[in-house]
Image: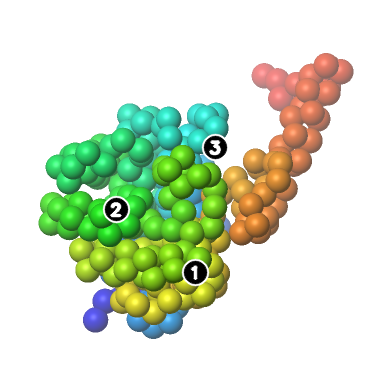
Amino acid sequence: MPAEIPAPYGTGPAAAGSGASADASTPKPAARIRTHHLQQAKAKGERFAMLTAYEQYTAEIFDQAGIEVLLIGDSASNNVFGNETSLPVTVDELLPLCRAVARSAKRALVVADLPFGSYEVSPEQAVATGVRFLKEGLAHAVKIEGGAFYAGTVRAMVQAGIPVMAHIGFTPQSEHSLGGYRVQGRGDDAARLVEDAVALANAGAFCVLMEMVPAETAAAVDAAIDVPTIGIGAGNATTGQVLVWQDMAGLRGGKMAKFVKQYADLRTTLGAAAKAYADDVRSGQFPGPEHSF
């Protein structure tokens, strides 16, 4: 039977040490979370958390906070590169971000989005792109958007040794064909989402992420498959939850989606810090004697 999800830093038997001296404030090493740990979590009725990450420091902070899965999302297009949608971001832009996160997170499972245009042409294209993210990006798994149509692609990637997280419901890369940001899986469409999830799980996806799906539909999907599910705007019946970290921490500003819970107000905090710094520079208070050689 697969082991439980490894304990966070500084907890569990390893934290007690074996007589070796160590700084008590230093986080203790933690075992790496693998895909089978997430599958075991569902079997035991446990839940896990997932956040996006795009660079070293947030990856370290979230990892040490106990976040089980870090996603290098194509949402970097909006949240790092300043685009209006996720569509423009490229493989070559995401790979350096992926490397930074994978090198910095010592416990979390690191998953990379395959961006728009990098897997749709054929299973062979998807395998080639997935290999790049595992080899060059150091990711542990990848995520692709789409329903049962992509079951063959998922199967080919898994057979090539690439763990795949599937993404159904609202798929941002298809926002133009879906008519914009709209809830998916209502009415008769609910059965199709269940069929999509079953097909993708049967093809070997280790997890199914659902975005902007009615809670009742998401619960039906979760009940229909053995692999864990992750929700974003999909109710509370999923095994895990994911948010874009800039939304979760209040960095982005502006109106938030209904499914976002804001846990901090970093935009205000950083703005105040920047203003205080600028004021000190202009007034001559910084640098002071204590900052000079």
Q: Secondary structure at mark 2?
A: strand
Q: Which mark is residue 36?
A: none
> Which residue is label 2 attached to?
141
Q: Is residue 50 above or below residue 87?
A: below
Q: Position of residue 17 (x, y in %)?
A: 41, 69
> Which residue is label 1 attached to?
187
Amino acid carrying label 3: it is Asn
The N terminus lies in quadrant: bottom left
> Which residue is label 3 attached to?
79
Between disc 3 and disc 1, whose residue precedes?
3
Between disc 2 and disc 3, whose residue precedes?
3
Disc tally is 3
Asked if the residue at tag 3 contacts the one at tag 2, i.e. Cβ–Cβ closer than 8 Å, the answer is no
Q: Secondary structure at mark 1?
A: loop
Foreground residue among 97 and 258: 258
Name the quadrant containing residue 291. Answer: top right
Q: Secondary structure at mark 3?
A: helix
Q: Position of residue 9 (x, y in %)?
A: 46, 63
Query: Dot 3: few (<14), some (14–19), or many (≥20) neighbours within 10 Å?
Result: many
In this view, the residue farthest toward the front is 188
Between disc 1 and disc 2, whose residue precedes?
2
Amino acid carrying label 2: it is Ala
